[in-house]
Structure formats: structure tokens, C-alpha cells
Amino acid sequence: MRSLWAGISGIIEGSEEPLYRAKREVWEETGIPENSITLVKSAPEIRIDSPQYDNHEWQVFPFLFSVQNPAITLNWENNEYKWVSPEEIKQYETVPSLDRVLASLL
């Protein structure tokens, strides 16, 4: 969703495991390799009504990773990144329910 702040995300293809896809998306969108991230927490699946399509919902599998001193290389999907505290997220125009997804991990 252009011009909105979002977390790293992607679409599960075929029978992929959500954790596998999450690690792959971290690599694709930031250039941070899997061996540099550590899974801190996962949360139960969240379903969010899509604002783009009628009668459509997103299935979100929240994961929280830690990383030490990452070198970020954004891909074509992004033009900027920021590290923000959970309290600061309300100051940004985000994709729907990003605050809810983040809250599920904290």
C-alpha cells in the first residue's frame, strides 16, 4: 500500500510455512540474512478486513525478530525505513491494523 508505513510483509506461496516466508521477506526487503536475525516471539494469526477489496481479508502471522547493528539495503518495495518505538507508531500513517499486529507481539 503505497505511501503508508508498514512492517516487513509478504504473501505465502503454496504450502510455505509462515516463519519461512517471514525470514525470506526480511532478507528480500532489508538485505538482512537469516543467520543475522533471531526469532523473539510469534503471535497467533490475526485476520484483518482488507480496505482494498470487498469481502476480502488478510491473514497476518506476526513475528518479532531481533538483530544487532544491521546494514539495511532496501529493495524496490520500499523507499525509506525508520526504527521506532511502539508508542511512536501512532504518529505515522500506516497500513490497516499495524498497531494491532505490533501490540500482539509486545
Image (spheres, helix red, strand yellow):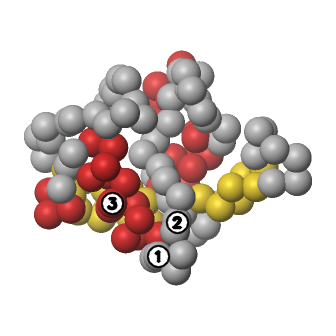
The disc placed on residue 24 is 3
Element assignment for label 3: helix
Residue positioned 20% across, 49% down in the render: 32
Q: Which residue is mark 1?
A: 16
Residue drawn at the location 33% of the way across and 60% of the way down = 24
Residue 81: image quadrant is: top left
The relative height of residue 64 versus residue 45 in the rendered view (above or below) is above
Q: Amino acid at mark 1?
A: Glu
Q: Are marks 1 and 3 in contact (CB under 8 Å)?
A: no
Q: Are marks 2 and 1 in contact (CB under 8 Å)?
A: yes
Within 10 Å of disc 2 (Cα), the crowding (few <14, some 14-19, many 20+) is some
Q: Position of residue 4 (x, y in %)?
A: 56, 26
Q: What distance separates the C-alpha of mark 1 from that of mark 3?
A: 11 Å
Asked whether residue 85 appears in the rendered view, the answer is no
Residue type pointed to by label 2: Ile
Residue shown at the point (31%, 49%) measured from the top left? 28
Mark sitting on residue 12: 2
In the picture, the disc for residue 46 is none
Q: Position of residue 72 (x, y in %)?
A: 20, 36
- Indicate the secondary structure of the residue bearing disc 1: loop
Left or right: 73, with 87 as reference point: left
